[in-house]
């Protein structure tokens, strides 16, 4: 089967729900979260033209990353891969007035460009979309604030923390501090923004930023710091361990909107504001299947390399691949704009 037939047969980009007063203003033309090629932003401090993309150093990036749970840091890519303007798939989505991408309407060059991006997920493409640089300070401020919450309440509890619980923790604990209006507006903008615009085509799983994971419906997995939803998710994990061996470990389980927000913002910082590049490695908040039962597995002793292709070369993965009841969410050349994730187990 050729690549066009493959994409035409299985592409299912979803319609994204929008909401929130701040996003309503954005949708009515009062500014944009994203930086478009037509814009020439200026630095508010000096009035000088701002460069495209942030310029964080490796030390600054390391200081902002979450304690656990983010895929291994990507190398800073110097490669500026030339991409035709017509290859920007997000433009096809926005011009059509809906978020379902019609593969049959794309040229061969556009199909090739889509596949090349997810195969080279850490490369920097000329058509990548960046967060407007005027958001740099609030991006850093908010990410650090989320890190304070995680550090104070603990990694495991942070995986389950709802947005309302985060707000209460900020108000009640001076070590965290209350979230300010600019941070809350920014979190809302990121959550409700349409990620099709920067190249992520996965389904919207959580439609409200305040959606919460019922604590009574999760089970803590010993020695992991992670939780799984009781029932299908927990049963599948236990079955995989029983059939593959005790070297299999849970590397990430159920994740709340707050946790996914922290991971995505940190990934965006690591990518120096390149939201396209960030979303090729990590689902934007509200779009992660970790909120409804998916989980990540790895091999004991492999550490951060469990979030790389190296995991697919282990004996454990080979055994999992032979099990007829296991699927992965993001296979090679998948349809979501996401890199190959052999560790991400699909539920349902």
Image (cartoon, rainbow, N blue to C red):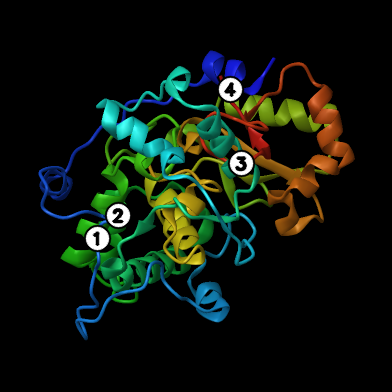
For label 4, the SS is: helix
Q: CB under 8 Å between callouts 2 and 1?
A: yes
Sequence-first tag of 3 and 4: 3
Mark 3 vs 1, N-terminal side: 1
Mark 3 to mark 1 CA distance (whole Å): 27 Å
Q: Secondary structure at mark 2?
A: loop
Say the numbered circle drawn on residue 232. 4
Neighbourhood count class around disc 1 (C-alpha, 10 Å): few under 14, some 14–19, many 20 upward: few
Q: Nearer the viewer, residue 87 or 338?
A: 87
The image shows residue 275 at horizontal and vertical percentages of: 42, 54
First of labels 3, 2 by sequence position: 2
In the image: residue 124, left or right of residue 260: right
Q: Is residue 186 visible?
A: yes
Q: Quadrant of the C terminus?
A: top right
* Residue 261 in the image, given as x and y percentages of width and height: 40, 52
Instruction: Tell me the mark number nearer the camera, choosing from 4 and 1.
Output: 1
Residue tagged 2: 36
């Amino acid at each position: 089967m050729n690549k066009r037939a493959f994409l035409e047969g299985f592409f299912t980009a979803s319609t994204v729900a929008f909401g929130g007063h701040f996003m309503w203003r954005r949708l009515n033309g009062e500014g944009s979260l994203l930086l478009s090629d037509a814009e020439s932003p200026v630095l508010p401090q000096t009035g000088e033209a701002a460069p495209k993309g942030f310029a964080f150093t490796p030390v600054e990036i390391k200081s902002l990353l979450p304690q656990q749970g983010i895929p291994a840091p990507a190398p800073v890519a110097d490669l500026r891969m030339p991409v035709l303007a017509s290859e920007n798939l997000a433009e096809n989505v926005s011009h059509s007035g809906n978020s379902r991408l019609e593969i049959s309407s794309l040229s061969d060059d556009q199909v090739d460009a889509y596949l090349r991006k997810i195969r080279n997920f850490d490369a920097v493409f000329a058509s990548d979309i960046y967060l407007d640089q005027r958001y740099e300070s609030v991006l850093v401020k908010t990410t650090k604030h989320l890190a304070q919450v995680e550090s104070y309440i603990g990694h495991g509890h942070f995986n389950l923390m709802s947005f309302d619980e985060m707000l209460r923790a900020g108000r009640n604990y001076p070590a965290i501090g209350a979230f300010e209006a600019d941070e809350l507006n920014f979190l809302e903008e990121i959550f409700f923004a349409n990620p099709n615009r920067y190249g992520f085509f996965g389904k919207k799983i959580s439609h409200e930023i305040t959606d919460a994971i019922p604590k009574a419906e999760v089970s803590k997995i010993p020695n992991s710091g992670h939780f799984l939803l009781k029932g299908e998710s927990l049963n599948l994990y236990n079955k995989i361990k029983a059939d593959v061996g005790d070297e299999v470990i849970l590397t990430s389980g159920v994740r709340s909107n707050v946790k996914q927000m922290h991971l995505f913002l940190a990934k965006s910082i690591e990518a120096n504001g390149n939201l396209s590049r960030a979303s090729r490695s990590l689902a934007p908040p509200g779009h992660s299947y970790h909120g409804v039962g998916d989980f990540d597995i790895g091999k004991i002793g492999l550490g951060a390399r469990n979030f790389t292709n190296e995991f697919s070369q282990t004996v454990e993965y080979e055994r999992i691949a032979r099990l007829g009841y296991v699927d992965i969410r993001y296979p090679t050349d998948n349809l979501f704009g996401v890199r190959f994730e052999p560790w991400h187990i699909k539920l349902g």
